[in-house]
Amino acid sequence: MNLKNGQPKSKDGIDLYSAKDFEGMHAAGRVAAEILDEIVTSVFPGQTTGKLDAIIEQLIENKNVDSATIGYRGYQHASCISVNHVVCHGIPGDKILKDGDILNIDVTVIKDGWYGDTSRMYVAGQLSRKAERLIQVTHDALFKGIDAVKPGKTFGDIGHAIQTYAEANRMSVVRDFCGHGLGRVFHAPPNVLHYGREGTGPLIEEGMFFTIEPMVNWGRPETKVLSDEWTAVTRDKSLSAQFEHSIGVTKDGVEIFTLSPKNKFHPTYS
Ligand code: MF3
Ligand code: CO
Ligand code: CO
């Protein structure tokens, strides 16, 4: 291990953290996950994405943490809400949810300087069979990725596990957005790709903090960003889903910082 700016670094230059730092990340991740649990009952047909964001902003204030997204590169909201064919970075607003809509809500908070970043899928009203399959495969793809995290493996192993699983289910993995290192900053190296080849990419070492946040499309993987410069959509207008956890690498696996306290991570568990 190699020290630079006081922070230990991995062989490939990725920040490594201590046991005490794991506690800070756990506390931050837990608050983000609680917020995603508490928003569940507010998602229904007729609700607007702007109202959901306002509720989230209030929850953040009540929990005495800060939003990492308000003011981030000019973004002005406490969440990203991505409905149906929106892949990520959907901007909350006047959009009214209708029966059968699926949506990802992504919240990042800062607690005592540590970042907790998580997202999951919700449904307004009745879940269609197709949306249910997409959500299940995306959820399970995230956990295939998490299962691949172990000191001595590589980031390519994570991407490979996710891509193989999604494609075996005849769905596609978005290439244009990735997970990221985080800690006392929102976005740090490495880029955590959700596709790739086994044994490629940086080495995974104990003490790393990063997100895994695969976006899986029902159709083709290509995306485009709308003129608002945030909203990313599938080019073929097919349905898209995403789940995200913030994790830390332990001696023999992972600690998930953003586990749902009420076991509501998957929309059909609740
Ligand atoms: N939370 C997102 C992520 O997973 C980033 C959102 S940045 C924003 O990395 F500005 F769009 F909110
Ligand atoms: Co993230
Ligand atoms: Co996020």
Image (cartoon, grey):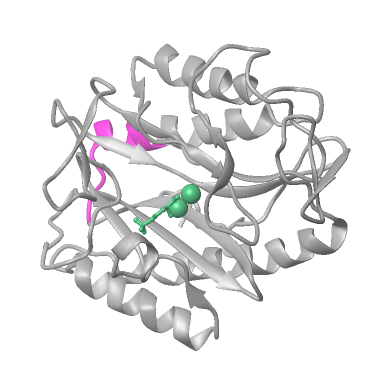
Residue 79 appears at what percent x and percent y? Answer: 35, 64
Q: Residue at x 61, y 62 (%)?
A: 29
Q: Residue 134's image quarter?
A: top left
Left or right placement of residue 133 versus residue 47 in this view = right
Q: Foreground residue, 46 or 28? A: 28
Residue 107 appears at what percent x and percent y? Answer: 43, 62
Classify the position of the N terminus by image quarter. Answer: top right
Q: Is residue 234 magenta?
A: no
Is residue 133 visible in the rendered image? The answer is: no
Q: What segment is highlighted magenta in the picture?
A: 125-135
Q: Residue at x 56, y 17 (%)?
A: 160
Q: Residue at x 38, y 83 (%)?
A: 58
Q: How many marks?
A: 0
Q: Residue 78's image quarter?
A: bottom left
Q: Residue 161's image quarter?
A: top right
Residue 33 appears at what percent x and percent y? Answer: 54, 63
Question: For the stretch drawn in magenta, what is the main secondary structure?
Answer: helix
Name above or below for residue 44 compared with residue 15: below
Residue 96 appears at what percent x and percent y? Answer: 11, 63
Q: Is residue 130 magenta?
A: yes
User: Among all residues in the image, which is located at the extreme front?
Assistant: 5
Classify the position of the C terminus by image quarter. Answer: bottom left
Left or right placement of residue 181 versus residue 206 in this view = left
Q: Foreground residue, 161 or 77? A: 77
Is residue 158 visible in the rendered image? The answer is: yes
